Image (spheres, helix red, strand yellow):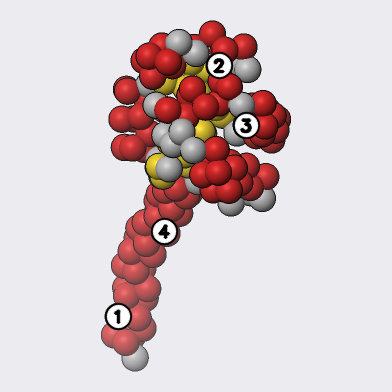
Amino acid sequence: MKQKFLVVLMSLFLSIPVLKAADVRVENEDVKNKTEMKEADKLVVVWTSGDKEVAMKMVFMYTYNAKKQGWWDDVTLLVWGPSSKLLSEDKDLQDYVKKMQESGVHVMACKACADQYGVANKLNALGIKVKYAGQDLTKFIKERKVVTF
């Protein structure tokens, strides 16, 4: 009887560190999952089209609602290429971008592209951060979810 009692007691005693190690593993996995969720909740929409209908019916509609509806925590619209020229000329698109900015969407434009079209100052005047964006795009691709239109 004493022997059985000692075996049970030893088994119980030896399992305590194992349980603690399992708890640490679960906590580490929870931290990892939270980190992954945070990274997964960052979206960058790269808008390259010079077509207003594509902008209004797809790019802007999705980008705005992605932030407003809480589908993504962090949403960035990157204006790239022909879209920079279109945005600089079109009041409807400018108003929509302002609405997106007010909802919390970060809007930035590629300076190299904007300079090619001579519209960097116009985009800056709209409150858009205009900067050389090649490195930013590379970082976005590595760290966030990126869609292009």
Tell which circle, 2 or 3, labels the residue nearer the N-terminal end: 3
Q: Callout 1: helix, strand or loop?
A: helix
The CA span between labels 3 and 1 is 76 Å
The CA span between labels 2 and 3 is 12 Å
The CA span between labels 3 and 4 is 48 Å
| Mark in the foreground, 4 or 1 | 4
The residue singled out by tag 1 in the image is 7
Tell which circle, 1 or 2, labels the residue nearer the N-terminal end: 1
Q: Amino acid at mark 3?
A: Leu
Q: Residue at x 55, y 43 (%)?
A: 53
The residue singled out by tag 3 in the image is 93
Determine whether label 3 and label 1 are within 8 Å by CB.
no
Tell which circle, 3 or 4, labels the residue nearer the N-terminal end: 4
Residue furthest out toward the bottom: 1
Q: From what the image shows, is residue 92 above or below residue 37?
A: above
Q: Residue at x 45, y 47 (%)?
A: 40
Tell which circle, 3 or 1, labels the residue nearer the N-terminal end: 1
Q: Residue at x 35, y 29 (%)?
A: 137
Q: Is residue 123 visible?
A: yes
| Mark in the foreground, 4 or 2 | 2
Residue 80: give x, y in percent of width and height.
Answer: 42, 27
Q: Amino acid at mark 1?
A: Val
Q: Callout 4: helix, strand or loop?
A: helix
Q: Residues within 10 Å of mark 2 (few under 14, many from 20)?
A: many
The residue singled out by tag 4 in the image is 26
The residue singled out by tag 2 in the image is 123
Q: Residue at x 49, y 12 (%)?
A: 120
Front residue of 39/64: it is 64
Q: From what the image shows, is residue 8 above or below residue 73?
A: below
